[in-house]
Amino acid sequence: MSCAYDVMYLSLASRVMGDMFDFAVNTLQINIREFFDMFVVSKMAYQFELGNPTYIAGKNGCEIAKEVVERCTNTYPDTEDCMYLDKSPEYWIGWALAQYQWLRNIEYAVIDEYQPIEDMYGMYKTYHEADISLFIEIMDEKWKFYRQTSMLKRLRAYAELSQSQLARKAQVPLRQIQLFEQGKRDINKTQGETLKKLSMALNCRMEDLID
């Protein structure tokens, strides 16, 4: 797997992203979950994934945080830039995410599926003073588990349905759902009618269920 962009931008991108999250949460008083979602929806995450120097080299983290908010709310925060000397948990979360995304070249929105941004607070105490390689090792384990999980199971979990609840809602045999999720039956080869029932119950497209 190739890295996301040239290593010459990594250090700067990590600092900028750290300052962006720090400023958004601690100065603009935006919940980190809400801000991360804006970061993705605004397409700013995509610019970081590219290592676009227009953003990571041309602006500081505070300016980018304001731009993210403006893109999503049409309101530009009239707040003075503030980058703290004492680095907060939010700074570390942004910095560590940038390091990991660069190394593994995985979209931020996908990383959030197996490591929700708000749950990274629980990693701060253990890993913020440790070498970044330890954080990357843990993230790689989460990524491996995520890749081994069927799309059906992920979508069912997102919909907050048990297997039996999904079976009733979709009118699909419970055992069939269990076999799909265990990888003992190939959902890619199942009948279109079954995929249609499951997709309607999960409020997704039929193709979203294909592994």
Image (cartoon, rainbow, N blue to C red):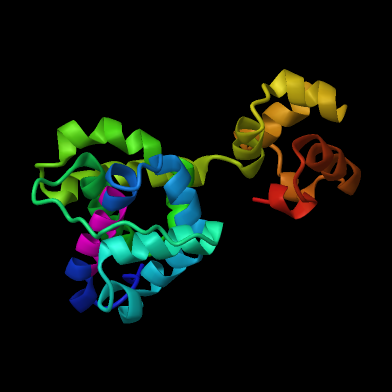
> In the rendered image, which quarter contains the N terminus?
bottom left
Q: Quadrant of residue 30?
A: top left
Residue 58 position (above or below residue 193): below
Which residue corresponds to the image point at 31% horizontal and 56% vertical from the top-left?
79
Q: Position of residue 118 (x, y in %)?
A: 38, 37
Q: Position of residue 130 (x, y in %)?
A: 10, 43
Q: Nearer the viewer, residue 157 or 195?
A: 157
Residue 94 drawn at (x, y percent): 28, 52
Residue 3: horizontal and vertical position, in percent? Answer: 31, 70
Image point 77% across, 51% down: which residue?
205
- The secondary structure that dominates the magenta segment is helix
Look at the image and say whether residue 18 sits in the magenta stretch.
yes
Left or right: 46 in relation to 28: right
Q: Which residues are magenta?
A: 13-22
* In the image, residue 131 above or below residue 12: above
Q: Nearer the viewer, residue 178 or 115?
A: 115
Q: Nearer the viewer, residue 82 or 126?
A: 82
Q: Residue at x 73, y 44 (%)?
A: 187
Q: Nearer the viewer, residue 184 or 124?
A: 124
Q: Is residue 68 left or right of residue 21?
A: right
Q: Residue furthest front?
A: 78
Instruction: Locate residue 56 relative to residue 157 in the image: left or right.
Output: left
| Residue lying farthest to the right in this orientation | 193
